Image (cartoon, grey):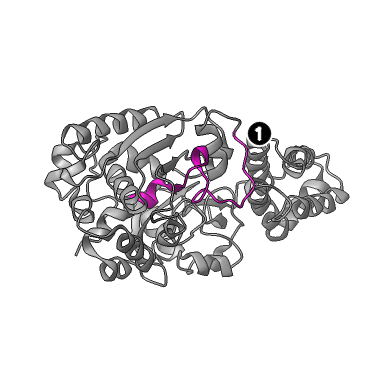
Amino acid sequence: MLINPLTKNVTDQNIATDLERYLGNGGYVGWRKAHTIDPDKIIDLVKDGGLRGRGGAGFNTGLKWSFVPRGADAPEQKFIVCNADEMEPGTFKDRLLMERDPHLLLEGMAIAAYAIGASIGYIFIRGEYHLAAERLEYAIEEAKAQGLLGTDICASGFSLEIFVHRSAGNYICGEETALLNALEGRRAIPRAKPPFPQVSGLWGKPTVVNNVETFCNIPHLVEFGVDWYRGLGRGEDAGSKLFGVSGHVKNPGTWELPMGTPIREIIEQHAGGMHDGLRLRGLLPGGGSTDFLGPEHLDLPMDYDVIGKAGSRMGTGTIIVLDNKTCPVGLVLNLSQFFARESCGWCTPCRDGLPWVVKILQRIEAGEGRSEDLDLLHEQCKRIGPGNTFCALAPGAAEPLQSALVRFEQDFFNHINQHRCPYR
């Protein structure tokens, strides 16, 4: 049984899988099979398979597709868009897929486009991902030359053109409506919802936006079916997942593992454990915009709901570890500086609140903090939290801070009382 559908074509060498090798290893079988299935049944298959979005939100992918208008009264023009603007701190999984197996992404997008009736697709890719963009553009030309993309694909009557769009670079473009604004050539700011993109998205037409890894799950789900896909996971969540670890571990990287793999196994077995002389104090389980968990959570499975109940989010599934010789105040300051710089400036709590957080944290880290600064930080976490901003950028930025203020409270006190950073 295939257990590594996302990485089965990824070799140790840093080379891309070309079309010949991809076809020889079972590539585009799911795409050819999709043509024999009613589009609505493909949507139901993806929904029943339990594939949840791998970009961070974890929403059921098939359910998301089902919101696209269908039937005689639906708009003729629809779009499929891949969010490849991978800018979440500590996240580097989508880059692996695009650089090493670009046809897998194209096949997944093609099936999704067929399911919702889209005839044009865009890969909105992070501007710094030059190699990934080049390999995707080459793969598109290969697929078109073989009749797998373009007009009247496989004599099915279905046509699809896919284009690579290189982002100008902004973290806010990870939010799907800001991405669509940028793709239209406008300022990258989040849109008010509703209407949702599935009804009124790119240029006002029905649009589905999914993450790279999400699309890459589709071909094998269609080929092998729901029972196979659900059987890949160890817990409630279905499928396999690219998990990553960064920080002071012996073997930082990314690996395809079953959903529900325990945190301990990912860090100690695959990432090699902490460097000698260091111990783990905390971890961000899903990239830089998630709440800290502690050593007591190491045996939790990496499932969306389990991590949520523990007080954090699985997010992108890329773990950032904090060791006992790294300053948690400095770590949170570093993340806050990133989020403040990347704010689109559209709403006041994010535009003005995040720089204020940075200023306070800089003061504490420099040994000039005051006890009331901690009250100010707690208050700011509430003001930039969920429900107070247009999108999730500021609430996400608040997560590592609000959890650090509780989990590493003594470290903040030590900075203030000793008038210096104790880790220097």
Q: Secondary structure at mark 1?
A: helix
Magenta highlight on residue 190: yes
The answer to whether residue 412 is seen in the rendering is yes
For the point 27% across and 53% down, the residue is 219
Q: In which quadrant of the rendered image does the N terminus lie? A: bottom left
Magenta highlight on residue 110: no
Q: In which quadrant of the rendered image does the C terminus lie? A: top right
Kind of residue at badge 1: Arg
Q: Is residue 123 left or right of residue 378?
A: left
Residue 41 pos. (x, y %): 30, 63
Q: Is residue 419 left or right of residue 302?
A: right
Which residues lie in the magenta part?
188-215
Query: Can you identify the residue that label 1 sits on?
Result: 341
- In-front residue for pair 206/121: 206
Q: Is residue 22 above or below residue 236?
A: above
Q: Is residue 321 above or below residue 179?
A: below
Residue 147 pos. (x, y %): 17, 37
For the point 71% across and 48% down, the residue is 389
